[in-house]
Image: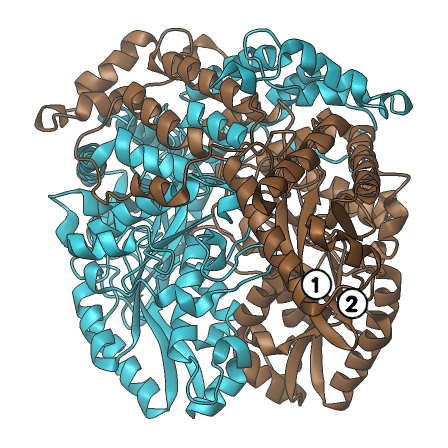
Chain colours: A cyan, B brown
Amino acid sequence: MALSQQKSEKTQQNLFLENELTPQYAVANDVMQLFAPSNSLVCTEAKMTIETDVLIDNFLNAINTNSDIEFNSLIETFADSQVPVNPADFDTYLEYLANNVINHSIHTSSPRFIGHMTSALPCFVRPLAKLMTAMNQNVVKIETAKAFSPYERQALAMIHRLIYNFSDKFYSEHVQNSQSTLGILVSGGTAANIIALWCARNKSLGANNSFPGVEKAGLPAALDYYGYQGAVIIGSELMHFSFEKAADLLGIGTHSLIKIPTNGNNQVDLVALRQAVADCQSKNLHIIAIAGVAGTTDSGNIDSLSDIADIAQAANVHFHVDAAWGGPLIFSEQHRQKLAGIERADSVTIDGHKQLYLPMGIGMVFMREPHLAASIEKNASYTMRKGSFDLGKRALEGSRPGMALFLHAGLHLIGLKGYEFLIDAGIEKTRYMAARINAMPEFELLSEPDINLLLYRYIPQTLRDVVVKKQLTESQNQEINLFNERLQKSQRQAGRSFISRTIKRISCFEKEISVTALRAVIANPLTTKEDIDAVLNDQIQIALDLEV
Amino acid sequence: MALSQQKSEKTQQNLFLENELTPQYAVANDVMQLFAPSNSLVCTEAKMTIETDVLIDNFLNAINTNSDIEFNSLIETFADSQVPVNPADFDTYLEYLANNVINHSIHTSSPRFIGHMTSALPCFVRPLAKLMTAMNQNVVKIETAKAFSPYERQALAMIHRLIYNFSDKFYSEHVQNSQSTLGILVSGGTAANIIALWCARNKSLGANNSFPGVEKAGLPAALDYYGYQGAVIIGSELMHFSFEKAADLLGIGTHSLIKIPTNGNNQVDLVALRQAVADCQSKNLHIIAIAGVAGTTDSGNIDSLSDIADIAQAANVHFHVDAAWGGPLIFSEQHRQKLAGIERADSVTIDGHKQLYLPMGIGMVFMREPHLAASIEKNASYTMRKGSFDLGKRALEGSRPGMALFLHAGLHLIGLKGYEFLIDAGIEKTRYMAARINAMPEFELLSEPDINLLLYRYIPQTLRDVVVKKQLTESQNQEINLFNERLQKSQRQAGRSFISRTIKRISCFEKEISVTALRAVIANPLTTKEDIDAVLNDQIQIALDLEV
C-alpha cells in the first residue's frame, strides 16, 4: 500500500483537534482515542492485545471444562441494568471480564469436553477473527464487500461440488454467475433449514397464470388456488427442532410437521414414510418437502438418504437433507458412502462451526438447482438492485459479516485430506469409547455408534445384574434414569469433564419407555484415548459418591 | 489458573504421538499442529498473528475506499471450484488473501467511505474478536455458554431500560429470570424484525379454548378459527425490505404488507395510516402489527412514533418499531426526543453493528412485555429443556456465537456519554455537509436531514439554471438521474471516496417521478469536515470529467 494512502501520525492527532464538538463532551477525547487508526506497535490497541492474549492462552490451555460456581450465584453478578454513564478503561473491564465471564465460561476446546458439538478450533481462526473484524465487510452487497462476494461464492461452490459433483461446465457457468445460487452462507443450521424449506414452499406453490404465488399472495390463498386442504413437511421424529421453528414461521404450523417413527438404528422408518406420503396425497395435503437427517443431534445416525430420495422423487416433492452435523463425512473416502443419496437432495444444510472446525456462526445451505433461490429473492432500491451481484437479495439475513473468511481458509489450510483425517479420527476414537463402555460393567452402551456420537448410561451397582439378565422393571429403569440425570448434573457442576444427556424413547413390550442417556460427541482433535478413559473414570468416581 | 490445569508442553507433544491414526494420514501431523493448544509466544500462531497484524494495520490506515480493479476481472480470480487436496501453509494463504481479497475489499473504516451504514470501529473490538473466537461459546444453551447467558441478558436489559425505563422492581424481577425475555440477540436487524412480527402473529392468533393457536395449527386454520378474511402488516412505504421477507416467510404474502405513503419528510402519512387501519377492520382483515420506522434506510427519517402508538393502541394492534439505524439516538439527550413514543412499542429492533459501532452480526429485538417471546418458544430433549436458562429456546437461530461480548463491552467502554457524543457528532457533521451542499451550485440538497443521512444530487452545469428556476422538465430530470448514476459508479470505481445512491420517488404535478439521489451516511467518527469537503470535491472532479 502506497505511503500516500496512509494518514501520518501527525494527521491522526489532528483528527481529534479538528473536532469542534470536543470541548462540549467530556468523554470525547477518550472515545476518539478508541477509534484512532490502528498502529499495533505503539498504541492503546497493542496493550489491549497483549493483555487479552494472556487470558486467551490460559483459557485455551485449560483441561477442566468449567468452573464449579453455582449458576444461581453466578447470575447475581449480572443483575445490574443501568448502562454505565462514563466509559470504563480497558484494563478495568478486562479484569472484570476475566473474573466474572471468562473464568466461568465453558472450555469448549478442552479435550475432556466431549458432550456437545462445540470443540477446539485450529489456531488460524484466531488471527483471522481479528482480521475479519478489522475489515468489517458487510456481505449483503458488493459496495460493502467487493472481493468478499465472489470469494464467498467460491468457497460455497467448493462444497457444492463435493456434494453434487456436477461437470466442470456446470461450475464454470454458475460459480460466479449472479443469477445462480449454489449456496447461501447464514448464521447457522437453523437458518439454513428454514431457508431450504422456505424455497421449497415458494417454488412448489409458485406463480401460475394469474396467481402470483405464495410469496406474494400468502399461504391461505396459495392452498386455495392449488386446491390443497393443507400443507405439510415430512421427516424423521429425530429431526432437529429447527424444523419446528420452520413449520411455525412458514405458516403451516408445527402440527403439520409430520414426524415418522425411527428404526432401532435411529433412522427414519421407510415403510412408515411411504405410508405418510400416501396418506397426505389421499388427504389432498400438499407436501412441501421430505427431510432426511444426516447425523441426528442425539446420536449422529444417518437416514437412508437414497431411499428417501426415491420416495421424494416418486412423489415429486422437494428433498431436503439436514446434514448440519454429518455433512463433512463427504470429505472421507472411508465414510462418505454413509451419505449416499445426498447428491439427489434438492437442498442440503451443513454447519461450518461443527465438523468443519470453524468458529460459531457459519451455517450453509446448498441448492442442487442454481435457480431455486430465486423463489425467495427480494430487491430494494437503495441496494440489492435486481441483476446486481449483491448476495443479500437471495437470503434470509440482511447485513452480515465476512464469515466466508473462515470457510475459505479452512478449505485451504486444512484441505480435503486434512478434513478426511479429522473425520476418520473422530469416528475411530468413538469406536474406542464404545468398546471401553462395552467392556466396563459400570456402563451400558445404548446403541452402536454410526459416526462419532455415542449414547450410553451408568448402571448403579445394585442393578447391574438385572440389566445383564435383561430383567429390568419399569421402576428400576426409572431409578437408573434419575441416577444418570444426577450423575450428569454432578459431573457438569464439578467441571473436570463433560458429557451431555438426552432422553431416548425405546419401544419395550409394546410400550414407549424413556431412557435418560449420557451423550458423548467425539469431535475434538485434541481428545486422546487417555482423555476418554479419564472422562469415564471421572463419571465412575462421581457415581460412587452418589451411590453412597 | 492453576498450573495443574495446564497441559505441559511435553504432554502436548504426546498428543500427536499417541494418535494411532497418524501414520495412515500424511497430513495428520500438519493438521494436529493447527490444533495444538495455543502458546502465543513461541508457536505457529504467534507468527500467524504478527503477519496478519501487518495486513490489518495497512488496511485500517487506508484513506482510499477501495481498489479500482474492475469487478469482472476480480471475479475471474475466484472461478476454481475444487477443494484443495492438501493443506496450504499459512504464509502462502495469507499472501493469496492479501493480494486477492484484502487488497480488493472495501475500506469501511475510511473517513471518506460515507455512503453506507458501515464504519470504523473502536479498537477494542479487535482483541475481543480474537477472544470471542478463542472462547468459542455457543450461546444456544448454558452447557456451552455458562457465564455468557446471564452476561448477554444483562447487556440486553441495559438497552431495554434505556428504551422503556421501567422500575427497578421490574428489572430486578426480569433481568435474570429465565421465564422472561427482555430482548433477543440475533445476527442482524432483518432477523430481529422477523422475530418481532413472528411474536406478534403468534400472540394475536394464539391458542384459545380448543384451538391450539397459529403456531401449531398454521395460518389458514388460525384465520378460519378467528373468522378473519386475511392478515396484514401495515407500515410506511419506506419500511426496510426485511419486512417483505417477514411477510413472505410468515405466510401472509408480500401483497399483505400494506405500504402507506409518506409525507415530504419521508414520514408515514398518519391520515393514510388511520384510513388503512379502518379499511382493514372493515374488510375483516387481521392486522398483525403496525410498524414504525426510526431511521429510514434511504434518508434516516423517523416516523412520528407517538402518533403511530396512538393508532396501534386504539386498534389494539402490536406496535413494532424498526429502529435498526435510529435506535441509538436514545443515548443522546439532545436528540432522543426524536424517538418519543418508542417506549410504547411492543417490540423494537436495534442494530449493534450500526450506530453502536460494533462488528457486523449484532441485531437485537426488545420486547416491552417480558413474556411475549413465549409465543415462539420451542423445546427439545437434548437441549433447550423447558424451564431451563437456555437462551436458544426463544429465538429464531439455534447455535450462535458470543457476540454479546462486543455489546456488553461497548456499553462499558464507550458508555452512555460516549455514545451520546458519537450520535451528536454524526448529526452535527451531517448538518455541516448539508450546509456545504446548499452553498455549492454543483449540488442540490433533496431533503433536510433528520439525523445523519443525507440525500442530494449533482446538477450538470447546463441544467443548473432550470433547476434554480424550478423549470426542470421530466426529460431533463431523467438526464440528471442518468448523470448521477454514472457519477456514483465512476466514484465507486475510482475508489478515492464513496457515496451510495438510491431512488427517491417524488410527487410532482400529480405524477410520481423518480429521482436518482446520492446518499451520504455520516457515521464514521474519523470523518472530519475536511473529509466531507474532499468527498464533495472528488465528486465535482469526476463530474467535470464526465461532462466533457
Dot 1 falls on a residue whose secondary structure is loop
Residue A300 x %, y %: 28, 50
Circles 1 and 2, Cβ within 8 Å, touching? The answer is: yes
Under mark 1, the amino acid is Leu
Lateral position of residue A48 relative to residue B271, left or right: left
- Residue B139 sits above or below residue A312 on the image: above
Q: Specify few, some or many for label 1: CA neighbours under 10 Å numbering under 14, 14-19, or 20 or more.
A: many
Q: Nearer the viewer, residue B511 or A94?
A: B511
Measure the C-alpha gap from mark 1 to mark 2. 8 Å
Question: Residue drawn 69% across and 62% down?
Answer: B477
Q: Nearer the viewer, residue B161 or A172?
A: A172
Disc assigned to residue A255: none
Question: Residue drawn 72% across and 33% down?
Answer: B532
Residue B272 x %, y %: 81, 76
Q: Chain of mark 2?
A: B
Residue A246 x %, y %: 47, 65
Disc assigned to residue B262: 2
Question: Residue drawn 74% across and 44% down?
Answer: B442
Q: Which residue bears the numbered disc 1?
A: B238
